[in-house]
Image (cartoon, grey):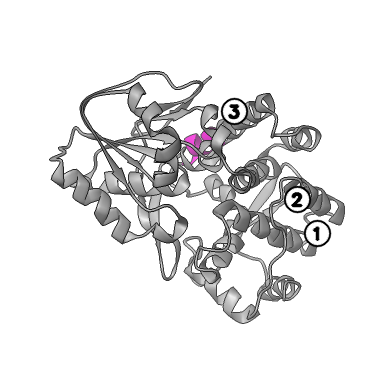
Amino acid sequence: MIIDINLPDCNYKVTIDKLLEIQIDTKTVIVTNPTVSGFHLDYLMSKVKSKDLSVVTVPDGEQYKNMETIEQILDHCFEHKLNRKSVLIAFGGGVIGDMTGFAASLYQRGIDFIQVPTTLLSQVDASVGGKTGVNNKYGKNLIGAFHQPRAVYIDPFFLTTLPAREFGAGVAEIVKMAVCFNKDFFEWLEQNDLRDGNNINIAIQKSVETKASVVNQDEKENGIRAALNYGHTFGHVIENETNYEKYLHGEAVGIGIIMANKVSVAQNLMTNDEVNRVQVLLEKYDIPTSYKINDVDDFYDHFFLDKKALDNKIKFILARGIGDCIITDETPKETIIDVLKDFR
């Protein structure tokens, strides 16, 4: 299965299939972490045919998604004398993909990179669309760039070694796509178990097709692409409050989806029955749906550090039933505060 990404300044293909040989006629660096390299690095290296191939291994975890790790990647590139024709390969989950893409955007003002995602979350969402970046003390992905990959290779085989929590984190992003854009897909998810190999392949394909359609319409998130942040406005605050250590990104998004849905109910956009259906689907894969807020006002203030906040207004993505959504900066503060109080 090949899905095309067609953008004003570049086109590339997302291939969903068993990984075939990757030919690169220049110096190439694989960026990965100890967990992924322990399971799959030999396999990838057997597939990459490059003029000069090296590997840089960076620490594993969202807490290492920072400028210090970017410096480590860039130092490796300089030490191995990469040039503007060289290529980086992101081999890991969303953290590796975001950092590799960002490092590629910076090195000598920008070189190519290839995504080979190994987690469900990165396969269905993070590897497609060119968002790259790192976190800092103020919030998630606040430093970064749009830098599209040269290609994306999604091999579902990598999921065979994925822990159950990581799998669930990826399912949260699949649910996000279905709730916002595809009611039929959501109903299919309710009826099918994604832990079945054939079903997960279908879900990956449907998710990537959805993401590709959105990115093709709005590369730089000036409009509809913002809808892909459903659950993220709340989730990013949760990640920041817990220092990126308690929850996986998809788990925080799952909680954020529940919070956003409660706002939708308050705005008469969703019924309680629809909210419950989404919650049941998330909990089917052990995705957390509850969170204790210690300081409601502080939690609310963190929204203004989000990239989607503009002119002292917070942009929320709210589900409108199942299969549709709205992007709005007109949600009353009192409504948001009332919802946050439910999580105290």
Q: Nearer the viewer, residue 228 or 133?
A: 133
Q: Earlier in the sequence, mark 3 or mark 1?
A: 3
Q: Which residue is mark 2?
A: 283
Residue interval drawn in magenta: 211-218
The residue most toward the front is 38
Q: Nearer the viewer, mark 3 or mark 1?
A: 3
Q: Secondary structure at mark 3?
A: helix
Q: Earlier in the sequence, mark 3 or mark 2?
A: 3
Residue 207: image tag: none
* Residue 131 in sight here: no
Q: Is residue 286 above or below residue 312?
A: above
Where's the C terminus, which quadrant?
A: bottom right
Specify the amino acid type for callout 1.
Asn
Q: Nearer the viewer, mark 3 or mark 2?
A: 2
Q: Residues within 10 Å of mark 3 (few under 14, many from 20)?
A: many
Q: Which residue is mark 3?
A: 205
Count of numbered tags: 3
Q: Nearer the viewer, residue 121 or 336?
A: 121
What's the CA distance linking mark 1 and mark 2?
A: 24 Å
Specify the amino acid type for callout 3.
Gln
Q: Residue at x 69, y 34 (%)?
A: 195
Residue 268: image tag: 1
Q: Residues within 10 Å of mark 2 (few under 14, many from 20)?
A: some
Percent x, y of residue 70: 29, 54
Q: Secondary structure at mark 1?
A: loop
User: Is 212 within the magenta?
Assistant: yes
